[in-house]
Amino acid sequence: GAGVSQSPSNKVTEKGKDVELRCDPISGHTALYWYRQSLGQGLEFLIYFQGNSAPDKSGLPSDRFSAERTGGSVSTLTIQRTQQEDSAVYLCASSLGLAGDQYFGPGTRLTVT
Amino acid sequence: RKEVEQDPGPFNVPEGATVAFNCTYSNSASQSFFWYRQDCRKEPKLLMSVYSSGNEDGRFTAQLNRASQYISLLIRDSKLSDSATYLCVVKNTNAGKSTFGDGTTLTVKP
């Protein structure tokens, strides 16, 4: 079946602009996660959604970052007033409940110039 | 100190070698443990879950020592295609959040 999909695959933006990154989880997966991976670094947790519960936003690095999950499916990560340090690969994952194995999308490579 | 620590390597081994990676975690509330594999410029992919009794999947063996808060991955008879970065992942299932180690890089050479 279809895996996790993300769009765009690459995004180049100017410093100060807003960007939106999209994630389509695996159908039926109730949990959805966002991570960030800078070049040569490990994955940094940003936020996760589980069903209709309030999301865990504890990993968001600043108030310029926000995420939504509409209808329990598609999620959008928004970064306002982008900075050069926001340049990274943004990875989305989904799982069947919080205890399920996480499956990752191919990521969005964000470059802020 | 990081919550999940791995030796970054790199580990350079010849084909056919046996190689072991270690991982330590600091949060004793952690409940679930995994090894992921990440190829260069690709997303992480689940390699195997790690169970308390230890588990094996072909050439791969994972072990967990809760008392020492230590996880290991053993790869036997290394193949060229095993070259990748191996990520140790620790999860507090109740909290939902997963913590990833920075990874150990393996290069298998002919």
Image (cartoon, coloured by chain):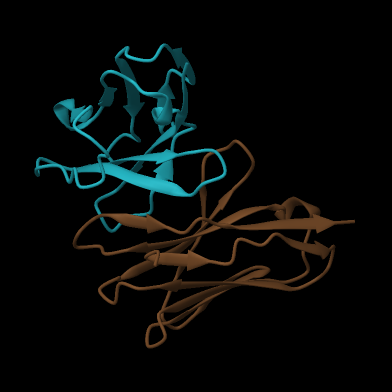
x and y percentages locating residue B18 in the rendered image: 75, 73
Image side of residue A50 versus residue A21, left or right:
left
Please, is residue A75 above or below residue A113 in the view?
A: below
Q: Is residue A93 left or right of residue B54?
A: left
Outermost residue on the bottom side: it is B67
Q: Is residue A68 visible?
A: yes
Report the front residue among A21 and B75: A21
| Nearer to me, A94 or B69 | B69
Q: Is residue A59 left or right of residue A87?
A: left
**Horizontal and vertical percent for residue B44?**
51, 46
Q: Is A68 above or below relative to B93?
A: above
| Residue A6 percent location from the top left of the image | 41, 25
Q: Residue at x 65, y 68 (%)?
A: B58
Give the camera-side residue of B73 and A47.
Answer: A47
User: Residue shown at 55%/57% (left/top)?
Assistant: B103
Q: Colour of chain B?
A: brown
The answer to which of A95 and B72 lies nearer the viewer is: B72
The residue located at (38%, 15%) in the rendering is A15
Which tint is chain A?
cyan
Q: Position of residue B28 (x, y in %)?
A: 29, 77
Q: Is residue A31 visible?
A: no
